[in-house]
């Protein structure tokens, strides 16, 4: 049979308890006689408290963002109707880029249709020749790893958050003029933060550039949610709109030269339809809320602290300052079993398994969002304590 690896590979996923399936979230009106709040999800006609969402600030469905989306659609249309360099670059895009530049205090910003493509774009652009050297944290996102290895650069991975290891690797490439240190600002599956200040200092000392993927930091870190740039000067930042900012697409901030280079040479930018101008307009509204509404970040911190306090001592929790709290279970089967037990209690908590995380580190990735409340957290911690006991 043609392409028989397809069936074989899927079957292997099943035997390893790594099989993945799509689940469709329904709209609330499909559940009769139940009040569905923003912190809930409806699947197969049953409602669950959702602890697997990346809507960290609770902005999804915010009336001001929805209103801006409608206004953007009315003014510019739902579709850019071409790539940016043809006719797809609208006032909505320019205005969003200007706002991001001001927010992060950076000279230039460029929009992409997804964080995944933005990461591919950066690594492919900077890795034009084998004379470029990339140094990536071992826990970097799949799109950073793919981008780095698809490029012509020489790639080294440093041990997670280990500045000494990174420094040693850089030492060996002292003479290379093109060195890029790359890390996530807040790590997607562990929730811990990179040591942004140390990375920035090391980059400066070694004449390297620092690149941070702020997918999970934007909106969350900094007094106005500016992400890692509130902690140190980051040469290039990428962040997605599809998490705390509750729209979709992504941006890169950088200097004028790199901006010009990407516009001229990045295939991911040039040969892709620009993001929806209506979404760009809505994203401006969501950034404005993320900047102003500090209470959302404070609520995440308070609820996270409560959750950490309520968990039983035998539970292996990675302690973090972010919205993401990983409970390490280890074995894939056990992680699935705990996730299923929690579903029976009305809690949706997806088990994260290899290859997303390392073998024997399957986990429950709890995300605490600004639209959760104290009662939700007490209930969650109680159910987890019972399920893992
Ligand atoms: C760290 C990180 N980088 C990049 C991405 C990709 O972003 P997007 O969902 O916009 O493609 C994600 C999200 O899935 C992520 O977690």
Image (tube, rainbow, N blue to C red):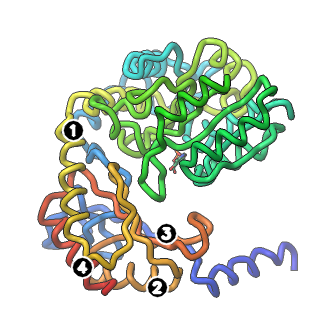
First along the sequence among labels 3 and 2: 2
Q: Which dot marks residue 383?
A: 4
Q: CA distance from mark 2 to mark 4?
A: 16 Å
Q: Secondary structure at mark 1?
A: helix
Asked if disc 3 and disc 2 are in contact, CB closer than 8 Å, the reply is no
- Residue density around tag 4, few if under 14, some if 14–19, many if 20 or more, within 10 Å: some
Task: Tell me where residue 29 appears, x and y as whole percent.
Answer: 23, 64
Q: Is residue 264 left or right of residue 184?
A: right
Q: Which dot marks residue 352?
A: 3
Q: Which dot marks residue 252?
A: none
Q: Judge by depth and name the residue closer to the eye, 276 or 229.
A: 229
Residue occupied by mark 1: 63
Residue at the spot 30% in from the left edge and 75% down from the top edge:
45
Q: Nearer the viewer, mark 3 or mark 1?
A: 3
Q: Is residue 221 left or right of residue 296?
A: right
Image quarter in which the N terminus is found: bottom right
Mark 2 CB within 8 Å of ligand 1: no
Q: Disc count in the image?
A: 4
Q: Which dot marks residue 334?
A: 2
First along the sequence among labels 2 and 4: 2
- Residue density around tag 1, few if under 14, some if 14–19, many if 20 or more, within 10 Å: few
Residue at the spot 78% in from the left edge and 37% down from the top edge:
172
Q: CA distance from mark 4 to mark 3?
A: 18 Å
Task: Tell me where residue 365 appears, x and y as whole percent.
Answer: 40, 65
Task: Tell me where residue 27 appears, x and y as whole percent.
Answer: 30, 61
């Amino acid at each position: 049979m043609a392409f028989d690896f397809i069936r074989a590979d899927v079957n292997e996923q099943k035997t390893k308890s790594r099989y993945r399936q799509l689940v469709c979230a329904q709209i609330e009106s499909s559940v009769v006689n139940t009040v569905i709040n923003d912190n809930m999800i409806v699947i197969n006609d049953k409602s669950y408290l959702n602890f697997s969402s990346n809507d960290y600030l609770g902005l999804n469905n915010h009336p001001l963002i929805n209103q801006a989306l409608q206004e953007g659609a009315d003014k510019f249309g739902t579709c850019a109707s071409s790539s940016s360099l043809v006719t797809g670059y609208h006032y909505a895009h320019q205005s969003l880029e200007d706002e991001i530049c001001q927010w992060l205090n950076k000279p230039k910003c460029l929009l992409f249709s997804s964080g995944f493509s933005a990461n591919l774009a950066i690594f492919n652009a900077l890795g034009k020749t084998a004379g470029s050297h990339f140094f990536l944290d071992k826990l970097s996102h799949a799109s950073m790893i793919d981008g780095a290895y698809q490029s012509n650069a020489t790639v080294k991975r440093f041990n997670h958050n280990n500045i000494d290891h990174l420094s040693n690797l850089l030492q060996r490439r002292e003479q290379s003029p093109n060195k890029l240190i790359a890390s996530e600002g807040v790590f997607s599956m562990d929730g811990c933060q990179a040591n942004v200040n140390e990375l920035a200092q090391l980059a400066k000392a070694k004449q390297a550039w620092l690149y941070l993927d702020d997918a999970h930091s934007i909106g969350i870190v900094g007094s106005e949610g500016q992400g890692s740039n509130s902690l140190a000067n980051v040469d290039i930042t990428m962040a997605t709109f599809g998490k705390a900012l509750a729209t979709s697409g992504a941006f890169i901030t950088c200097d004028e030269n790199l901006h010009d280079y990407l516009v001229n040479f990045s295939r991911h930018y040039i040969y892709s339809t620009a993001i929806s101008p209506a979404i760009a307009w809505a994203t401006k509204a969501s950034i404005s809320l993320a900047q102003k509404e500090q209470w959302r970040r404070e609520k995440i911190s308070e609820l996270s602290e409560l959750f950490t306090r309520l968990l039983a001592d035998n539970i292996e929790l990675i302690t973090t300052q972010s919205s993401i709290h990983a409970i390490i279970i280890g074995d894939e089967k056990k992680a699935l079993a705990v996730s299923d037990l929690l579903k029976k209690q009305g809690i949706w908590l997806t088990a994260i398994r290899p290859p997303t995380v390392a073998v024997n580190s399957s986990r429950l990735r709890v995300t605490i969002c600004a639209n959760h409340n104290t009662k939700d957290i007490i209930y969650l911690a109680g159910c987890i304590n019972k399920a893992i006991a």
